[in-house]
Image (spheres, rainbow, N blue to C red):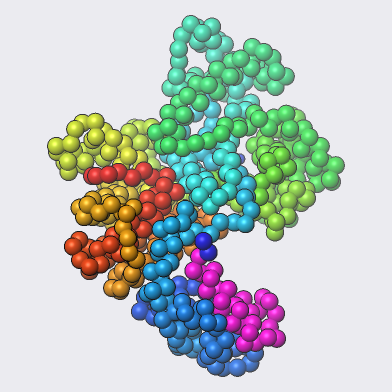
Amino acid sequence: METLHHILQASFTKAIRHAFNDLSEAESHAEMAPCQQEGFGHYQCNSALRLAKIVKKNPRAVAQEIEKALDQKTRAMCDKIEIAGPGFLNITLSSSFLSHEIEHVLADSHFGASLPARCLKVVIDFSSPNVAKELHVGHIRSTIIGECLSRLFEFLGCEVLRLNHIGDWGTQFGMLITYMKEHAKAVLRGEEKTDLISLMGWYKNAKKQFDQDPEFKNRSQLEVVRLQSGDSESIRIWKIICEISRKSHQEIYDLLDVKLIERGESFYNPLLKDVVDELEKKGLVTISDNAKCIFLEGFANREGEPLPVIIQKSDGGYNYDTTDLAALRHRLFVEKADRIIYVVDSGQSLHFQMIFKTAENAGWYDPAQIEVDHVGFGVVLGPDGKKFKTRSGETEKLMDLLTEAVDRARTVIRERLPDAPEEEIDHLARVIGIDAIKYADLSSHRLKDYVFSYDRMLRFDGNTAVFLLYAYVRINGIQRKTKVDLDKISGRLLLQHPSEIALGLHIRRFGEILELMARDLLPNRLTDYLYELADKFNAFYRDCRVEGTPEEASRLLLCQAAARILKQGLEILGLQTVERM
Ligand code: ARG
């Protein structure tokens, strides 16, 4: 289904072309926006102000000519089209038109969102933790935002490849394998089970010994060579290490209901030499301090010295940059992605700018054809405004944080539903606790740091998951109370009261919001929209009686549309709904 924004934009563009036939195609393109103030109308077209300069007429006169040139179909959609201020065109849609539109939304599998003409392939790199280290709060944002964007593009009919670019390769494995060969013999013989906690302990010890003991350092470096050359015992131990990490990370993905395909740095290892060769052949590489470097225009460090992408170190080793270049090339040429998205903290923004620029210079892609975006995000802060830490001062572990949210949700729910069986309370606590964490993250503008607060995220008022879940429960409650079988409702939907019209218009705008979100990749667009939806629903329910009125059937249909959009919106955010709370 086309969005109203598109429909109106097309009609007004046509009218402009009709009224001023000397304009170029770009010049006659109509700007359409939702009205700033509800009282003025539903949409507004501001193009007259811009066109006035081109056709050298007064903007109000231009607006008048546009209005006169509108076709019959557009007029029939509107109650009134008014010229206001210096030359704005304010459009008020008719309630009968909007009512029809909501009926269509109810029958539409995509609730009024328009789908791209062709199925696009979108690669999203997210979560991407490192092996032998636990996921921490820093990874939560990437995981939650990446899952949300994946769901958005899936809903919009794209083929999404969700990639977990885990840090599973590099020289650090040399010391870890050496340490385990010396201190974890029983584990390596398969006689003893182990977990990520022990692994992290070994990693810490190995690092310490590596820094203090030259003999150990030497053995570790030899181990790196063995691993790189594919020595079977080294590879076997490396696989054990990866498997321990994988198991622990998977527990978190399961709890968060996140799906990812693992394609770590090791996957690209065999491709690195080729990438370096190609870049050299293309003349992009400069040797600096014995390292192979790519210098890009406009990239300098704080001292103003040129900052290179280092693709091969002086010791011959490859690094993070090389791997990301190989990954980008693979995603472009093997995966044939139409769009590539990296959900990684803003601290890595320079890294990605340089990788993208290098790929562009190598002729791998044209940014006008294929969108490659770094979706950065800010830091999670504690109540003291500093980086979130546990009481012991360590960076908070993700699993502890999720468990705590679920525990706190359990306390809240037990108070509200004292008679509910323990099983139901457990289920609700799990859903509400996880939803609260996700929503708190997605509803803050991703580029800003945000303050983590269990108390705030579990509140029943304000812009929280709990508020939205409760709104959803309430709407379903209304439907249940009337005992009307919604599938069998006959009769039309007719929006009458201003609160009904406001809710109807908002419901119809769902697709527009998703389109904006797909463009700027800001999940808080959708949370803001849903919060407003719940608000508009509450106003409608306050102003309009449903049960036992002549309007009951129509209003129930409106409730149903609101409930479906709310549920679908929450689903795109990665949130589950509940039936009572
Ligand atoms: N493993 C990295 C880290 O934890 C993030 C990787 C992000 N993805 C990428 N293609 N570089 O910092």
| Drawn side of residue 562 relative to residue 16, left or right | left
- In the displayed structure, 287 sits above or below 500; it is above
Q: Identify the residue at image location x=32%, y=64%.
A: 491
Q: How many marks?
A: 0
Residue 9 located within the stretch drawn in magenta: yes
Q: Identify the residue at image location x=47%, y=29%.
A: 249
Quadrant housing the C terminus: top left
Whether residue 525 is visible, yes or no, is: no
Q: In which quarter of the image is residue 222?
A: top right
| Drawn side of residue 85 relative to residue 549, left or right | right
How far across and down, in percent of the image, does residue 547 sit?
A: 20, 61
How far across and down, in percent of the image, does residue 108 sit?
A: 46, 56
Residue range corresponding to the magenta coloring: 3-29
- In the displayed structure, 95 sits above or below 322; it is below
How far across and down, in percent of the image, does residue 146 sit?
A: 50, 44
Residue 565 located within the stretch drawn in magenta: no
Whether residue 128 is visible, yes or no, is: yes
Viewer-nearest residue: 446 or 301: 446
Q: Identify the residue at image location x=53%, y=64%.
A: 2
- In the displayed structure, 59 sits above or below 306; it is below
Q: Identify the residue at image location x=37%, y=74%.
A: 95
Viewer-nearest residue: 456 or 10: 10
| Drawn side of residue 120 relative to residue 136, left or right | right
- For ligand 1, the image quadrant comes to top right
Q: Quadrant of residue 198?
A: top left
Residue most extreme to the left: 419
Viewer-nearest residue: 527 or 565: 565
How far across and down, in percent of the image, does residue 258 sit?
A: 46, 37
